[in-house]
Image (tube, helix red, strand yellow):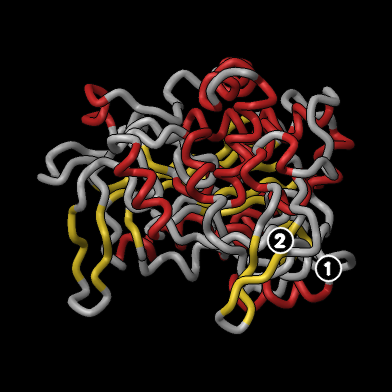
């Protein structure tokens, strides 16, 4: 792979936009063929990025959670069309909002709906019911416990009828807890992190390890400033003991590329399972909503990942995170890559998807 090609040009462009730290890695046919690190990992900007930094990867957590769920599907512990209430009874009698009034839903919410984000949930982590749960649990809000409060919030549409970026993966984490009989983070450690050799990844970081996390910022678009906001997960960690399946993983670049490579090579899931995950799984109406919200018509949605459209020109699958992390696997080229930064509302957010084109160009040149 070209070391001074399109990927490096793009990363240099990110630097000119003021991104405080950048780390990008590319694997081709099982070997690292590109790695670029720049910037500083601490707020004082005295410690250069050395690759050992840990990041809040936010929604890149979703691919890990979906892998956990699909492992249980492979083992016939969970089935895609199981009702969610079979694992979480509080989701049995759901209501939806229609023209400002509440109505009972007609469709039963299933595991498939959660995986495809067509369950009718939202991403409102500050709802009245969740705030009530935080008070009643003394701020702990363990993952399974949190579902009792989340299920009190009405759905915004009939399950299966549309697509909404939402807390679906957090509900999936609770389903895994019930199916596995232990907390979600322990399942992931035993069945994903340990198998992939991911020694620095977790969904519940001890307080004494917070200094290992790279300085995290929020970009103020109006002032064009990067504002330091501390090491902790913002917004999505609704309790001190909450393991968010949708946004709660803390990892490092070496760990996450190990996850992607193990996933690509079929060491975590069978290849037929991966093929199922990475083909379109949503209806036309849901697809229209997906394009409207995500803004990229080149992809559609599978089981927990963006995926290529049939007969399209894009062939990768993956996702991205709120602080700028971005992942892609290109099966036909035996390529996977991971890009990490730590800026919420980053100016890079809209253009990071061009990394895929840049990687492809450099690999084939």
Q: From what the image shows, is residue 331 above or below residue 235? A: above
Q: Residue 206 in the image: x percent, y percent?
A: 30, 23
From the viewer's side, name the closer residue of 263 and 280: 280
Q: Quadrant of the C terminus?
A: bottom right
Badge 1 is on which residue?
283
**Residues marked 2 and 1 touching at CB (< 8 Å):** yes
Q: Quadrant of the N terminus?
A: top right
Question: In the image, which disc is placed on residue 118?
Answer: 2
From the viewer's side, name the closer residue of 250 and 51: 250
Element marked by disc 1 = loop
Q: Residue 245 in the image: x percent, y percent?
A: 54, 40
Instruction: Tell me which corner region of the image, top left, top right, bottom left or bottom right, holds residue 95.
Output: bottom right
- Residue shown at 45%/27% (left/top)? 201
Q: From what the image shows, is residue 323 above or below residue 139? A: below
Q: Nearer the viewer, mark 2 or mark 1?
A: 2
- Residue shown at 66%/39% (left/top)? 89
If you read the primary sequence from the N terminus, does the residue marked by circle 2 or circle 1 appear first?
A: 2
Q: Judge the density around disc 2: few (<14), some (14-19), many (≥20) Cα neighbours within 10 Å.
A: many
**Does the rendering let one see residue 11?**
yes
Q: Is residue 321 left or right of residue 337?
A: left
């Amino acid at each position: 792979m070209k070391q001074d090609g399109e990927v490096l040009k793009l990363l240099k462009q990110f630097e000119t936009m003021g991104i405080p730290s950048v780390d990008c890695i590319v694997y081709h046919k099982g070997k690292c063929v590109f790695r670029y690190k720049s910037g500083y990992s601490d707020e004082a900007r005295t410690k250069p990025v050395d690759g050992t930094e840990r990041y809040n990867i936010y929604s890149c957590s979703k691919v890990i959670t979906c892998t956990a769920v699909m492992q249980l599907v492979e083992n016939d512990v969970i089935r895609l069309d199981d009702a969610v209430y079979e694992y979480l009874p509080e989701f049995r009698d759901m209501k939806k909002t229609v023209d400002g009034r509440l109505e009972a839903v007609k469709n039963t919410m299933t595991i498939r709906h959660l995986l495809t984000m067509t369950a009718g949930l939202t991403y409102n982590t500050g709802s009245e019911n969740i705030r009530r749960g935080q008070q009643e649990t003394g701020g702990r809000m363990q993952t399974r416990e949190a579902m009792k409060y989340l299920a009190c919030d009405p759905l915004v549409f009939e399950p299966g009828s549309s697509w909404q970026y939402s807390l679906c993966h957090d509900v999936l984490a609770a389903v895994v807890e019930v199916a596995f009989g232990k907390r979600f983070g322990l399942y992931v450690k035993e069945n994903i992190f340990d198998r992939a050799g991911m020694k620095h990844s977790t969904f519940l970081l001890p307080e004494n390890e917070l200094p290992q996390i790279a300085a995290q910022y929020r970009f103020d678009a109006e002032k064009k400033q990067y504002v330091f906001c501390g090491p902790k997960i913002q917004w999505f960690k609704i309790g001190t003991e909450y393991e968010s399946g949708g946004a709660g993983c803390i990892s490092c670049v070496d760990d996450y590329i190990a996850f992607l490579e193990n996933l690509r090579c079929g060491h975590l899931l069978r290849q037929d399972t991966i093929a199922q995950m990475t083909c379109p799984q949503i209806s036309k109406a849901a697809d229209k909503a997906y394009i409207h919200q995500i803004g990229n018509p080149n992809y559609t949605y599978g089981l927990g990942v963006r995926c290529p459209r049939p007969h399209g020109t894009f062939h990768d699958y993956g996702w991205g995170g709120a602080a700028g992390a971005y992942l892609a696997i290109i099966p036909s080229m035996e390529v996977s890559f991971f890009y990490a930064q730590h800026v919420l509302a980053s100016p890079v957010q809209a253009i990071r998807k061009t990394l895929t084109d840049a990687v492809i160009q450099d690999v084939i040149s």
